[in-house]
Each structure stands twice: as C-alpha cells, then as structure tokens.
Amino acid sequence: MTIRRLKTYAGSQGYVYQYYFVGKRPAMASGADPSEANEYIFDVSSDRKLTYAVSIVLPQQVVAAWGASHGRTLSDSEQYAAVKMRLFRAFDELDRMQAQGRQLQIDRQSLEDALAALGVER
C-alpha cells in the first residue's frame, strides 16, 4: 500500500488546494516522441470533495537548453522542483484550476523563472 503525503497550498485566488504527487512518466509533447518529455502527475482538490489529475509536461528540449546555457545538467530533484513551482503558479493564476489547469507545460522562460526563484544557478 502506497501512502501519499497530502500537502496544502493557499493560492492567491482564495482557494486552498490539497495535492499530492502521483508519479512521473514519459509524455507526448507536441506530437513528439514520448522519450522527449516527462509528464508529472499530481492529484489536486480545492474543495476536499472532488479530486482531479493535473499533468505538467517538461520537455527534454527545454531541460537541455537550460543545461547548455548554464553549463551543467539539471538533477531530477531540480526538475521536480521546477515542476512544482509551475503547479504553484497555476494555483496562484488560474481562478478555475479544474477547468483551465489540467494540462500545463513548462517552457524555457518558465523553467528559468522557477529555478531562479529557487536559487538554482550553475
């Protein structure tokens, strides 16, 4: 039996979200080969009644571009941290997370912003 660690985040839209990490798997990014992106899945609830899946896709091309510009590769934990920051940004920006935020993508700029906010440099 897997015990999941339920976490809470108070979004700026007034909702208090509960979420937990479900897992990571290869994903399709813009019709590309599944090995070219990873999908991180979270189960989310904003009312403690209904839980829904939120997927965040991190293309390997974006990770490689970050690595090329910073002179090193990102560790798995740094990639996960950036994904979680993208989830938090969606909690803060979207007023209807269930309708608008079920599939999110990380682009190069959002990866840079997330890692800079976390203090990840070279």
Image: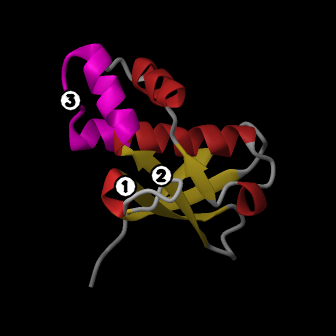
User: Tag 3: residue type?
Assistant: Thr
Residue drawn where x is 24% and y is 32% of the image: 74
Residue 12 rendering spot, x and y as whole percentages: 73, 36
What is the spatial separation of the Cα atoms under label 2 and label 1, in whole angstroms? 6 Å
Please tell me whether the stretch drawn in magenta is mainly helix, strand or loop. Answer: helix
Task: Provide the secondary structure element on which disc 1 rests.
Answer: strand
Task: Provide the secondary structure element on which disc 3 rests.
Answer: loop
Residue 108 rendering spot, x and y as whole percentages: 48, 29
User: Tag 1: residue type?
Assistant: Asn
* Res 38 label: 1
Among the 4 quarters of the image, the one containing residue 44: bottom right
Residue drawn where x is 52% and y is 24% of the image: 109
Quick check: 66 above or below 43? above
Among the 4 quarters of the image, the one containing residue 65: top left
* Res 73 label: 3
Residue 88 rendering spot, x and y as whole percentages: 57, 41
Residue 23 horizontal side relative to residue 106, left or right = left
What is the spatial separation of the Cα atoms under label 2 and label 3, in whole angstroms? 18 Å
Residue drawn where x is 79% and y is 55% of the image: 96
* Res 57 label: 2
What is the spatial separation of the Cα atoms under label 1 and label 3, in whole angstroms? 16 Å
Q: Nearer the viewer, residue 71 or 13?
A: 71
User: Tag 2: residue type?
Assistant: Val
Q: Are marks 2 and 3 in contact (CB under 8 Å)?
A: no
Task: Provide the secondary structure element on which disc 2 rests.
Answer: strand
Indicate yes or no whether the magenta region holds residue 62: yes
Q: Are marks 2 and 1 in contact (CB under 8 Å)?
A: yes
Residue 100 rendering spot, x and y as whole percentages: 75, 55
State the extent of the magenta-drawn residues as a range.
61-80
Quick check: 116 above or below 38? above
